[in-house]
Image (cartoon, rainbow, N blue to C red):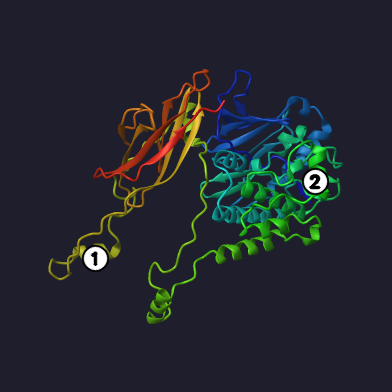
Amino acid sequence: MSTISGVGVGFSVVGILQPADPRLIGPYRLVGRLGAGGMGRVFLGVSEAGRPVAVKVVHARLAADPEFRARFSIEVAAARKVSGLFTALVVDADVDAPVPWLATAYVAGPSLSEAVRDRGPLSVPSLLSLAAGLAKSLTAIHAAGVVHGDLKPSNVLLALDGPRVIDFGISQAAEAVPLARAGLVVGTPSFMSPEQATGKDVGPLSDVFSLGAVLAFAATGRKPFGTGTAAAVLERVVHGAPSVEDAPREVRPLIERCLAKDPRQRPSAPALLADVTAAQAAMEPLPSPASQAAETSSGGKPHRGAARRRRPWRPLITASAVAGILAASGAAGYSLNAATPHRPGESALSHAEARMAAKPAGLVPTRAPEPPPPPRITGTLTYQHGRMMYFVILFSDPGHIASGFGFVGTNGSDWPRQRHAFSSPGEGIVEANSIAYPLDQACGTGLEYASDVKAWIYDTAGARTKPVVIHLVCRT
């Protein structure tokens, strides 16, 4: 099996391009900086069709090394084989360019390390959802004949619809611990497996150990083998017991099985997924005697609402909004006519309703139409661009009646109350089911400050959703 390096990138802050930065890599126009590491720089790029991608560009000094080029080519070929809902995919690459590069799917979401840093350890339901997503990721990666080799909290991005596994390892390699393999560093001491730390051959079960270490971090907010020098941490990885005693009891057995020193005692990724699914099912409440009686009286079918839906996974902190940064970099935003009660091209009436409407009055009992479902806020995001902090409201609008948005400063902030229609959003950037709006926080000037805003969506009748509070703070 091969080890991925550089499978995907996602960041919560997009910086502006510097004068020395390239503006075009392959077919991709670069519009912002995502980060840099020991092996290269990463940019937010846009394809000719407008698709956002993360473009990783290798440092020129490494591009001149034939051995590095050969290794980079092998890694890109391995990464192309990986597919799955919970991985960030390679979409393009040129390993033979004067400066090699690869483009991956851009993931608009914070890393797990950022989430735990900003909000603390995850709740038990979120931990189990995270474990399920990571197990599915590794299942897809291993099915492609690939070993990740550097699974860690900063390589797990919390997208709105679930976690994504990426690999920034090739960028971090200059600071990682050397392995006696191909002359290239892959891995991070606190999340390595014992066999990886001792330079032995690694397989899929090495990734499972790293998954256990990631879950331990998410559950406790600490690295399971402590801190200190790389040598001290690796000594504990190989011979010491992990610190997981304060992990929630619902997930501690899963973590401990993954962190077994002997790979043969660890579950495979599919077996771990089965264990996580069982743990999630065990958390479902048992039916009450009343609901059991109701089920019996209804012929074995539970009443509507008797079954409890499992809570969907949601990210715990804010993330960058790609649409906003593209618009702030010169790409055009799209206006949204949210007052239209149905999508363009859709018929306002079903075939059955149309037949009923065509019948003479009196032959069909009249019935007042049901009101359309109201819009609902599904999440909030923030990102920084120049002096500005953008807040983003994500919303669901099944009834197609969302008409605009409003906000006001709160908790001491002096932003005045504002109300904007989606058809004329002022400085806002409207996309399908999202609105981004900039506020001047003096980011990058040395006069930065934090503020809170309370924001909402309103419909065509003027009714507001339940407001959400968004915290805006510059990151330097």
Mark 2: give few (<14), some (14-19) or many (20+) Cα within 10 Å: some
| In this picture, residue 10 sits left or right of residue 365 | right
Residue depicted at x 29% and y 46%: 340
Q: Which mark is residue 236?
A: 2
Q: Secondary structure at mark 2?
A: helix
Q: Which residue position holds label 1?
A: 355
Q: In this rendering, does residue 87 appear at all?
A: no
Asked whether 251 or 335 is in front, the reply is 251
Give x and y (percent) for residue 325: 49, 31
Looking at the image, which residue sits at the far left?
Answer: 362
Q: Where the C terminus falls, by quadrant?
A: top right
Q: Are marks 1 and 2 in contact (CB under 8 Å)?
A: no
Is the residue 242 above or below the residue 18 in the image?
below
How many numbered marks have been drawn onto this rendered protein structure? 2
Mark number, residue 442: none
Q: Residue at x 76, y 29 (%)?
A: 63
Could you tell me the amino acid type at mark 1?
A: Arg
Secondary structure beneath label 1: helix
Front residue of this view, candidates 126 and 46: 126
Q: Position of residue 336 (x, y in %)?
A: 35, 39
